Structures are given as structure tokens and as C-alpha cells.
Amino acid sequence: MPFTGPVEDRLAIRELLDTYSHAVCTRDPELWGSLWAEDSVWLMPDYPEFAETHGRTAIVEMWNGAMAHYPGILFVTTPGSIEVNGNTAKVVAYTSEVYDQAGDTKRDRGVYHDECVKLDGKWVFKSRQFRNVHRQSGAKGL
């Protein structure tokens, strides 16, 4: 079943995903970093230039460096599955990104497979693994 567990927890996880998108669009490293557990891990196997990264501090440092390559990004997340089991959850979230790069407009679609944990009443990411699903590039503005 793709959506299981208490509605309150599923809503809080949806808000976690939405806050992540907002932090990306506004380039807010403090907000973005607050969404990760201290001992979290971020994996992006389709981006070999970004090694598997462990720990919130290292993840935020890596993100800050990466964001320089995505000016004017619009990043949207849609959950496909939120399965809550106590203070842990497995989440599948689809992403849609639009940004300008090297004179072209890029449109990327991807999927995150997440593990979330509830710490002190707040849901955060324990693990995120991102994979590309579709990439498109065209003349700027198209």
C-alpha cells in the first residue's frame, strides 16, 4: 500500500518534502540543512561527481557547492508513497526541476527513495537516494 500509517505523520512527511523543495528554490542552506538527521546519508549514483555523503554538515557543504550549477532553479516534489511505521518511514518522491545552464533550459525528472525518522516529534531525512528518470535540454526559455 503506498500511503500507510497515521495521517498526521504522513502530512508531516509531505510538509518535509514541500519544505525541501522550498529550501531548494529559495537557496536556503539553513532551512535545507534542518531537514536532515545529524547522521544522515545522501546518495546520487547518477552524479559521480558527488560522492556518497555522510553527516548533515558534509551534506549541506556538498549541496552549497552543487547549487552554484543550478541558477534560478524551480524544484517541485510529488510523493508517490509514504509508509509510516512508528518513528520511521519509507518514502518515494518524484521530482521535477527546471533551470538554465550553459545557455540552455534544462528539465530534469527524478525519483528519491528516502528513509525518514521522527526525532523529538519532527520528521527528518535519514537517507535519500536520488536517481534520474528523464533529462531534457533545449534553447533557453523553451
Image (cartoon, helix red, strand yellow):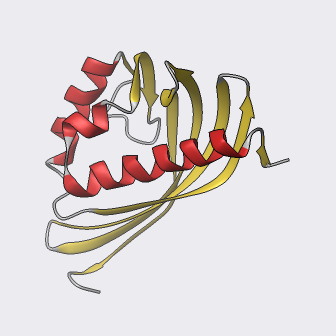
The residue located at (25%, 19%) in the rendering is: 57
Task: Examine the rendered structure and indicate whether residue 35 appears above or below residue 104.
Answer: above
At which x and y percent is residue 134?
A: 51, 63
Task: Examine the rendered structure and indicate whether residue 129 appears above or below residue 23.
Answer: above
At which x and y percent is residue 129?
A: 52, 35
Comparing 64 with 137, the one in front is 64
Comparing 55 with 84, the one in front is 84
Q: Name the outermost residue toward the right.
A: 1
The residue located at (25%, 29%) in the rendering is: 60
The residue located at (20%, 81%) in the rendering is: 140
Q: Is residue 68 left or right of residue 90?
A: left
Q: Quadrant of residue 52?
A: top left
Task: Examine the rendered structure and indicate whether residue 59 appears above or below residue 2.
Answer: above
Q: Name the outermost residue toward the bottom.
A: 142
The residue located at (29%, 87%) in the rendering is: 142
At which x and y percent is residue 18?
A: 44, 53
Comparing 28 with 45, the one in front is 28
Q: Quadrant of residue 78?
A: bottom right
At which x and y percent is residue 130?
A: 49, 42
Q: Is residue 48 left or right of residue 141?
A: right
